[in-house]
Image (cartoon, rainbow, N blue to C red):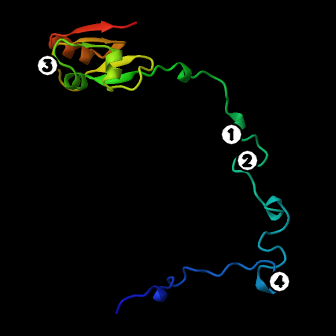
Amino acid sequence: MSLKIEDLKPSEGSNKPKKRLGRGTGSGHGKTSGKGHKGEKARGKGKISKVFEGGQTNIIRRTPKYGFSNAPFKKEYSIVNVSTLEKYFSENEEVTPEILIDKKIIKTINDGIKILGKGEITKPLVVKAHQFSENAKEKIEAAGGKIEVIK
């Protein structure tokens, strides 16, 4: 026997009837309709802000809103790994930011280009970039390449 869509029913006790408020004292939800007597929550929509702390100055207003953030001065470098240089360049070739953009290795220069040491390099290359990691310097020079820091 296969189940049909019309045979599906919610499980026992999962659908409760809605609470009928304000239908006389005999219903148990008459008079104040389950809201008690007076007070802020008994009136209107009865909504109180999540930040309201009973009249005490709330935490948002108590915390200081001054200070210093270095975020506007943060430098964002376009990153290129040594393994990428190995893949896209042949021996004794010059690597510059313009060539990296032409070969679509990076999209933009941003605040400069940083060469990182992930991967291996076997070809001697002349690499011109704004920054180099120590690991990248060692690997490029060990392969017989040269490093030039652009200002």
In the image, what residue type sits under mark 2? Glu
Instruction: Tell me the residue that label 2 is attached to.
Output: 53
Q: Residue at x 76, y 82 (%)?
A: 28
Q: Secondary structure at mark 1?
A: helix
Mark positioned earlier in the residue sequence (3 or 1)? 1
In the image, what residue type sits under mark 1? Ile
Instruction: Tell me the residue that label 1 is attached to.
Output: 59
Mark 1–mark 2 CB contact (< 8 Å): yes
Task: Say if 47 sits above or below 37 in the image.
Answer: above
Which numbered disc, 3 or 1, marks the residue closer to the eye? 3
Task: Say if 132 sits above or below 55 in the image.
Answer: above
In the image, what residue type sits under mark 4? Thr
Instruction: Tell me the residue that label 3 is attached to.
Output: 122
Mark positioned earlier in the residue sequence (1 or 2)? 2
Closer to the camera in the image, 131 or 71: 131
Task: Say if 7 sits above or below 115 in the image.
Answer: below
In the image, what residue type sits under mark 3? Thr
Mark positioned earlier in the residue sequence (2 or 4)? 4
Mark positioned earlier in the residue sequence (1 or 4)? 4
Question: Label 3, label 1: how many angstroms apart (C-alpha)?
Answer: 59 Å
